[in-house]
Structures are given as structure tokens and as C-alpha cells.
Image: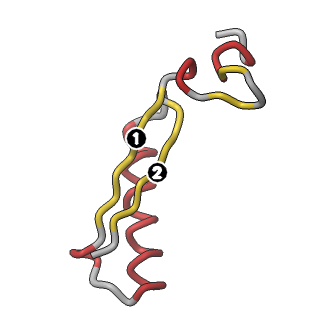
């Protein structure tokens, strides 16, 4: 049973996350020849202050 975890910054629309789940499920099902019913997708949303790039949080880099 494939289990896919995706980390993204919070703030995206629910419809985009639904599409992401749908599209990733289809690709994983095709590539691994696994039934879609067996594919699990988890989206982990992170606050900008919890994600760092080059020693700074995304919040600081974007002046949020």
C-alpha cells in the first residue's frame, strides 16, 4: 500500500489540495501498478515560520 507524504506551506485553497491528492493518486497508481483504492496521500501544511531555507525561515525571507 503506497503512502505518500507531501509537505507544503499553508495557505493554499482546498480545491488545489483536492486536485493534488487526485493527481498524485493517479500517478502513483499508474507507476506502481497499484489500485487507486490502496494509495494513501497525506498533505502536511507548515507555517512559514516552521520552514527554513538557507538559514532563515520562509516567513522572514518573505517579510510576512
**Which residue lies most toward the top here?**
63
Q: Which residue corresponds to mark 2?
A: 6
Q: Which residue corresponds to mark 1?
A: 44
Query: Which quadrant holds residue 33?
Result: bottom left
Q: Is residue 24 above or below residue 30?
A: above
Quadrant in which the N terminus appears: bottom left
Mark 1, Cα crowd under 10 Å, few <14 / some 14-19 / many 20+, is few
Where in the figure is residue 49, as x and y percent of width and height?
Answer: 56, 18
Are dots 2 and 1 in contact, CB under 8 Å?
Answer: yes
Q: Residue at x 66, y 20 (%)?
A: 57
**Which residue lies most toward the left here?**
37
Q: Is residue 58 above or below residue 13?
A: above
Callout 1 secondary element: strand
Where in the figure is residue 56, as x and y percent of width and height?
Answer: 72, 20
Q: Nearer the viewer, residue 46 or 35?
A: 46
Distance, label 2 to label 1, CA atoms, is 6 Å
Where in the figure is residue 17, as x and y percent of width and height?
Answer: 41, 46
**Lower sequence index among marks 2 and 1:** 2
Q: Residue at x 64, y 10 (%)?
A: 64
**Which residue lies most toward the right here?**
54
Q: Residue at x 48, y 84 (%)?
A: 31
Query: Which quadrant holds residue 15?
Result: top left
Q: Is residue 33 above or below residue 63?
A: below
Amino acid at each position: 500500500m503506497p503512502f505518500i507524504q507531501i509537505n507544503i506551506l499553508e495557505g493554499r485553497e482546498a480545491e488545489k489540495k483536492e486536485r493534488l491528492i487526485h493527481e498524485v493518486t493517479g500517478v502513483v497508481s499508474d507507476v506502481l501498478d497499484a489500485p487507486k483504492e490502496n494509495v494513501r496521500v497525506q498533505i502536511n501544511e507548515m507555517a512559514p515560520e516552521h520552514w527554513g531555507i538557507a538559514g532563515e525561515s520562509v516567513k522572514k525571507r518573505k517579510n510576512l
